Amino acid sequence: MTQPVIEARGIVNQFGAQRVHDGLDLTVLSGEIFGIVGGSGSGKSVLLNTILGLRRPQAGEVRIEGTDITRLDDAALRELKTIYGVTFQAGALFSSLTVLQNVQLPMLEHLDLGERALQELAMLKVRLVGLPADAAQKYPAQLSGGMIKRAALARALALDPRLLFLDEPTSGLDPIGAAAFDELLVGLQRELALTVVMITHDLDSIFRTCNRVGVIVDRKMVSGDLASIAANPHPWIQAYFHGDRARRFGAGHGA
């Protein structure tokens, strides 16, 4: 039986009088691509930051591989972070560093490697995400939007993580670029045996990549496979999964 890798129970996140999550539960299983969707202001990024240990919730717990990260001190949390990689919506690459130097940053922090090994390992990651070799020496300002996404992914894979978190990975890409990124993600997930959590608003990406989906509605989460989620009667879920675009794309994929 597939084991949970991430478990969030009873999560409460609040900003002043505004409660964003109120007893939210989430389970991510080993080896799956789990998509998180929700309306504007539903707290998707707040939830991601909570799972990553960047924000402590007002109540509840988050377990990664059985460890409650809400109770860890800074040193233990830093050590735990080596098992996962993260990409953020805008790429978050350091503009003053080349692609290769950006990819090397996590290696410099956590690995004891010589210069040659550092260079070779970083180039391996660059090639792994489908970037040409000459992209390694370019700066973020010299890259297209799709190349920035791939460079950020290469950095997220720098430490050979078991978990991968993606925040709006296809945002800003044209349909062809988004489809290519989705294909890359599915291939890497299979090849590297990754467990992936992806925040997205891109319905096409959900159908192409996700095994299960969690929808944030009414400050909680409804989770399941695509068929069960699409059948949920909640008005927001119905509008999202059964609008014109959803019908067009889903019909082509048997949904």
Image (cartoon, rainbow, N blue to C red):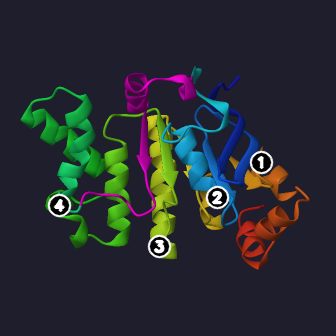
Per the rendering, the mark at residue 172 is 3
Evaluate if marks 2 and 4 touch, with contact meaning CB atoms under 8 Å apart. no
Q: In the rendered image of this protein, does residue 82 appear above or below residue 167?
A: above
Secondary structure category for the residue under label 1: strand
Sequence order check, earlier mark of 1 and 4: 4
- The three-letter amino acid code for the residue at tag 3 is Gly
Instruction: Give the image location of residue 34, x and y in percent.
Output: 63, 46
Sequence order check, earlier mark of 1 and 2: 2
Foreground disc of the pair 1, 2: 1
Q: Which residue is drawn at 15% across and 29% down?
A: 113
Per the rendering, the mark at residue 220 is 1
Q: In the image, 136: left or right of 52?
A: left
- The three-letter amino acid code for the residue at tag 2 is Ile
Evaluate if marks 1 and 4 touch, with contact meaning CB atoms under 8 Å apart. no
Q: Quadrant where the N terminus lies?
A: top right
Sequence order check, earlier mark of 3 and 4: 4
Cα distance in 3D space between marks 2 and 4 = 34 Å
Cα distance in 3D space between marks 1 and 3 = 28 Å
Q: In the image, 55: left or right of 14?
A: left
Residue occupied by mark 4: 96
Residue occupied by mark 2: 206
Sequence order check, earlier mark of 3 and 2: 3
Evaluate if marks 1 and 3 touch, with contact meaning CB atoms under 8 Å apart. no
Range shown magenta: 68-94
Evaluate if marks 1 and 2 touch, with contact meaning CB atoms under 8 Å apart. no
